[in-house]
């Protein structure tokens, strides 16, 4: 579990996806899960070394609701709450570099082709294709605007 420097909702990240990890995410009651392909994770994440590990992105630093949301996940896992909604699954396919200062997009809000991504007094950056942004403006990822994802259907994988 870790918090972030950007304004993201609670979501899970799975590297090396398999049925066991997907079921674990469902049992936790996660609303969103992000699949991180090997080409992006490449054995750098702690969860790559666990048989059934999921990284939890619990939201912005210092946000009071973070601990309540994580306790809710634990309650779901222990069977004290039953989560009824379907989980939305995204898969990362690209890293988007940040070209200009002011960010114009938000986490998990679909970006259309040619939509403005960033802008400042020297210019603007536009989307080359449609995508769903993940970890927008994360300070730990220097020079990176976000990870680009698309919704996936697990039955198609």
Image: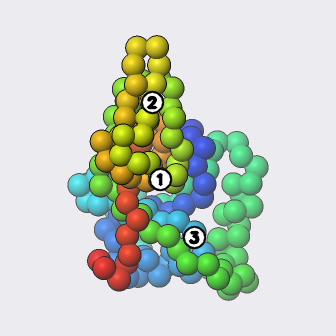
| Disc marking residue 30 | 3
Residue in the image at 31% along x and 68% along y: 16
Horizontal and vertical percent position of residue 40: 28, 52
What is the x, y in percent for residue 22? Answer: 43, 77
Seen in the image, is 140 located left or right of residue 154?
right
In the image, 112 versus 141, the foreground residue is 112
Residue at figure coordinates x 54%, y 44% from the top left: 106
Dividing the picture into quadrants, the one containing residue 31 is: bottom right
Which numbered disc, 3 or 2, marks the residue that appears first in the sequence?
3
Q: CA distance from mark 3 to mark 1?
A: 19 Å
SS class of the residue under badge 1?
Answer: loop
Cβ–Cβ under 8 Å for marks 3 and 1:
no
CA gap between label 2 and label 1 equals 15 Å
Disc count in the image?
Answer: 3
Per the image, the residue denoted by label 1 is 110
Residue 49 lies in quadrant: bottom left
Which residue does the numbered mark 2 point to in the structure image? 118
List the single residue furthest toward the top.
121
**Quadrant of the frame with the N terminus:** bottom right
The secondary structure type at the circle numbered 3 is loop
């Amino acid at each position: 579990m870790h918090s972030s420097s950007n304004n993201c909702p609670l979501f899970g990240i799975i590297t090396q996806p398999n049925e066991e990890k997907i079921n674990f995410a469902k049992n936790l009651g996660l609303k969103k899960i992000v699949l991180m392909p090997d080409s992006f994770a490449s054995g750098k994440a702690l969860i790559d070394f666990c048989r059934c590990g999921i990284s939890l992105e619990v939201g912005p630093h210092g946000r009071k609701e973070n601990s309540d949301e994580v306790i809710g996940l634990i309650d779901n896992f222990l069977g004290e709450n039953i989560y009824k909604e379907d989980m939305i699954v995204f898969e990362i396919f690209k890293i988007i570099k940040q070209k200009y200062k002011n960010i114009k997009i938000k986490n998990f809000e679909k970006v259309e082709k040619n939509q403005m991504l960033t802008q400042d007094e020297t210019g603007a950056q536009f989307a080359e294709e449609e995508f769903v942004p993940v970890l927008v403006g994360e300070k730990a990822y220097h020079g990176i605007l976000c990870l680009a994802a698309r919704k996936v259907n697990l039955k198609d994988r």
